[in-house]
Amino acid sequence: MNPATSKMDYKTKLASLFENELLPALNDFSSKQKRFPLYEPISYMMSLGGKRLRPLMVLAAADAYSASSKAAIPAAMAVEVFHNFTLMHDDIMDEAPLRRGKTTVHEKWNANSAILSGDAMLVQAYECLTLCSAEVLPKLLPIFNQTALEVCEGQQLDMDFEQRSQVELPEYIEMIRLKTSVLLAAALKMGALIGGAKEDEAQHLYRFGESMGIAFQLQDDFLDAFGDPEKFGKQVGGDIISDKKTYLWIRCMEKASEADLKTVDTWIGERNKGEEKVSFFKALFAKLEVDSEIQNTMESYYQDAMTHLNRANLKDEAQQFFSAFARSLMVREN
């Protein structure tokens, strides 16, 4: 990395490198659509864009330990295809109408098509990973396998919570660690190993990603309730309408008075008065100050992440880049 290159320029460079590699893959999906319609939803999902945080972390982590970012492209592709596979299936389970501001795959086609196309994406993710060098692949496969299973475990916990009347905060944090955080952490560790990092250095980068992933999901919880609909990219208040047990919900239930809880009970299961329901809970969150509490918790995970980042023995330029990345997650609006 050139010290004279700004952090934003460096991020743009990595994003361009990844998008240039992604384009041929999308064209390949498109060429297969005439014979196998299952590739059309894949092409659609992958072309929706998004932040591409995880593949960028793979590339940046490889570069941080002196390897060429291009050597990490197969792993970056694997992580991004896998991530989008999980989103496609999550949207079905959550009955979500929007993803990145666009119609979700199961709404645009149907649930069966989304399930089948998602299954194909999982296979494609592994195909991408096998293109990594033979020297590093044995180190990457266990990480990818463990992460894939942990993401499924996190989704299972998320589903289980929907059937429970009470969820403890530590349980929720563990769920989001599994469902969201471990993939970001794995992306960083795999990139670091491709770059030639020592095991302890790669593990510190993993822990950095793990804590930032939790902070990222807590920010998502906050934005779901208090975000700008035009910037958030998803249905604002969707978690509230579906009675999802987020950090805000759990702490609200722990702090609410008996009178508040009686009013809450009248809203459970109510989906026909979405705007009124969202307004009620946003006011209750603010009254009980759980909106500020979640932001304090985010800051705590951010500080833990920075502790591990400082121990990862990165090049100065990489240190600056990851520090800026972490701070950007804390102030994002979508």
Image (cartoon, rainbow, N blue to C red):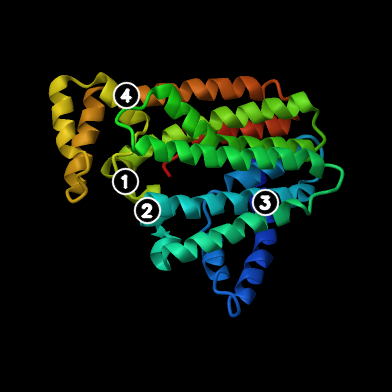
Disc marking residue 202: none
Name which of mark 4 and mark 2 comes first in the sequence: 2
Amino acid type, mark 2: Ala
Q: Are marks 4 and 2 in contact (CB under 8 Å)?
A: no
Q: Residue at x 47, y 40 (%)?
A: 156
- Of the numbered discs in the image, which one, if any, rests on residue 238? 1
Say which mark, if any, is on residue 251.
Answer: 4
Return the disc, 3 or 2, that comes first in the chain's sequence.
3
Q: In the rendered structure, which amino acid carries the disc numbered 1?
A: Gly
**Is label 2 in a helix, a strand or a loop?**
loop
Residue 155 visible in this rendered orientation of the protein? yes
At a point 66% along the width and 58% down the height, the residue shown is 124
Badge 4 crowding class, 10 Å Cα cut-off, few under 14, some 14 to 19, many 20 or more, is: many
Looking at the picture, tell me which residue is in the foreground, 4 or 249.
Answer: 249
| Residue denoted by label 2 | 96
Q: CA distance from mark 1 to mark 3?
A: 29 Å
Residue behind mark 3: 78
* x and y percentages locating residue 132 in the rendered image: 79, 50
Q: Residue at x 58, y 33 (%)?
A: 324
Density class for disc 1 (Cα within 10 Å; few <14, some 14-19, many ≥20) is some
Find the distance from the CA under tag 3 to the CA under tag 2: 24 Å
Find residue 307 and report its horizontal and vertical position in percent: 62, 19
In three-dimensional space, the C-alpha distance between marks 2 and 1, rounded to whole angstroms, equals 8 Å
Q: Nearer the viewer, residue 104 or 243?
A: 243
Whether residues under marks 2 and 1 lie with C-beta atoms below 8 angstroms apart, the answer is: yes
Q: Quadrant of the C terminus?
A: top left
Q: Amino acid at mark 3?
A: Ala
Disc 1 vs disc 3: Cβ atoms closer than 8 Å?
no
Earlier-in-chain disc, 1 versus 3: 3
74 left or right of 325?
right
Q: Secondary structure at mark 4?
A: helix
- Classify mark 3: residues with Cα within 10 Å, few (<14), some (14-19) or many (20+): many
